């Protein structure tokens, strides 16, 4: 895509993500247009540094002003194939446009770029897409709500049954630590790796977590008992919201209600940092995580995810709930943690 692609006076070109002035200009557009954390070039760069998946971006312009932006990660996997993901390893970050013509122009340019990069699939998480793209609104839901005025009001805002679980956890002698240093990162990765192994999925490279923390506004909250980390979450802060993004607990966490204490403590911590909303992220519709978030009083909002496939290409299947992967998940759950932690990052960097 050496020449820009134009639709109705809107030109689209590849972003020069190695140029600080270009990156700053796109960051300013994302902020002004109300884009998500995952629209930011800083997110793309962190994904590239942490996983090796190359960052790309398409900019729509009219009269010298940016009117649209599509962040893309070129994800390649010997297991799951190649895909252009907008945005890689994200739950949002699709087409961001301030004029109607920019959306179709960005998507058409993305199709051309995907074919040049030998990526038979494009996955776009949110935003307007052309009619010939496949759109699903039944696969995932997002969960966002306002934070309460203070700690006590926050506790009372939690539905009664879930509030009782939080109260039990608060009486279990748990301690809460928030930070960003090496001890925080190591404790978080150890807990998260065990959590996802138990769910049957490979763990992301720790380099991804480090790169994201170094590039973005985030921190780690860890809940421990007698010096042992039981639950930990890496959260990001963007546009007045806190997003607990990579979190989990050990096998002992459920007994001590450590996850319940973790999310309640994060709500209070985030309010102290100036956040006004709690973004619980996405969950597969009808999954255990989906119902867990509803138990906290969050109302699910369907998310629109779109995909495009090159002519003759088979749809990419990286869905952990797919029947195709059931045997692999069952095997992964039985792996020793050390083996899973060695193999997991190599596999997970290709999930996107």
Image: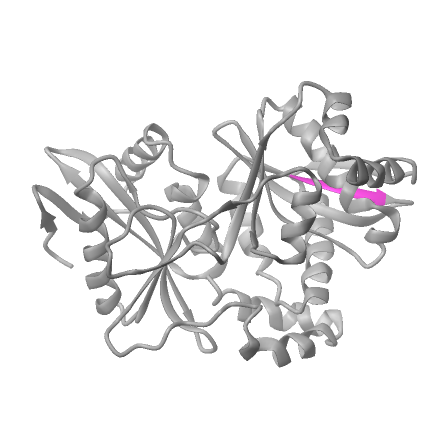
Q: Residue at x 78, y 40 (%)?
A: 162
Location of the N terminus (image quadrant): bottom left
Main SS type for the magenta part? strand
Camera sees residue 240: yes
Quadrant in which residue 41 is drawn:
top left
| Residue furthest left in the image | 9
Mark count: 0
Compared with residue 121, is residue 289 higher up or lower down, i.e. above or below? Answer: above
| Residue closer to the observer: 79 or 311 | 311
12 lies left or right of 185:
left
Q: Specify start and end residues of the magenta stretch as a single range.
A: 220-224
- Measured as percent of width and height from the top left, residue 198 is found at 73, 66
Compared with residue 209, is residue 298 higher up or lower down, i.e. above or below? Answer: above
- Measured as percent of width and height from the top left, residue 134 is found at 33, 62
| Residue closer to the observer: 130 or 42 | 130
154 lies left or right of 226:
left
- Measured as percent of width and height from the top left, residue 351 is found at 49, 65
Q: Which residue is drawn at 41% across and 61% down?
A: 53
Quadrant in which residue 33 is drawn:
top left
Q: Which residue is drawn at 48% across and 50% down?
A: 91
215 lies left or right of 334:
left
Camera sees residue 18: no
- Measured as percent of width and height from the top left, residue 3 is found at 10, 54
Q: Which residue is drawn at 38% across and 48% down?
A: 126
Compared with residue 32, is residue 10 higher up or lower down, i.e. above or below? Answer: below
Q: How is the rendered protein coloured? A: one colour
Q: Any magenta on residue 282?
A: no
């Amino acid at each position: 895509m050496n020449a820009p692609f134009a639709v109705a006076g809107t030109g689209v070109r590849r972003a020069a993500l190695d140029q600080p002035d270009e990156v700053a200009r796109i960051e300013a557009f994302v902020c002004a247009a109300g884009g998500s954390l995952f629209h930011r070039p800083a997110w793309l760069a962190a994904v590239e540094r942490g996983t090796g998946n190359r960052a790309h971006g398409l900019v729509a312009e009219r009269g010298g002003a940016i009117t649209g932006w599509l962040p893309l990660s070129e994800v390649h996997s010997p297991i799951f194939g190649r895909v252009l993901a907008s945005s890689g390893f994200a739950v949002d970050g699709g087409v961001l446009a301030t004029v109607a013509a920019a959306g179709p122009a960005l998507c058409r340019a993305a199709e051309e770029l995907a074919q040049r990069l030998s990526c038979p699939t494009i996955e776009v998480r949110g935003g307007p897409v052309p009619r010939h793209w496949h759109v699903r609104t039944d696969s995932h839901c997002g969960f966002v709500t306002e934070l309460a005025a203070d700690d006590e009001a926050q506790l009372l805002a939690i539905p009664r049954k879930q509030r009782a679980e939080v109260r039990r956890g608060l009486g279990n002698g748990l301690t809460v630590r928030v930070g960003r240093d090496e001890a925080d990162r190591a404790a978080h990765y150890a807990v998260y790796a065990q959590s996802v192994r138990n769910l049957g999925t490979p763990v992301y490279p720790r380099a991804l977590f480090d790169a994201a923390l170094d590039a973005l506004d985030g921190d780690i909250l860890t809940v421990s008992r007698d010096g042992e980390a039981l639950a930990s979450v890496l959260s990001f802060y963007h546009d007045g919201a806190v997003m607990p993004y990579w979190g989990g607990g050990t096998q002992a966490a459920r007994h001590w209600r450590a996850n319940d204490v973790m999310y309640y403590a994060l709500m209070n911590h985030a309010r102290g940092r100036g956040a006004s909303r709690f973004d619980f992220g996405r969950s597969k519709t009808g999954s255990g995580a989906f119902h867990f978030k509803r138990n906290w009083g969050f109302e699910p909002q369907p998310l629109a995810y779109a995909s495009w496939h090159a002519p003759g290409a088979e749809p990419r299947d990286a869905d952990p709930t797919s029947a195709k992967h059931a045997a692999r998940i069952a095997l992964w759950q039985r792996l020793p943690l050390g083996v899973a932690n060695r193999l997991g990052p190599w596999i997970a960097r290709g999930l996107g």
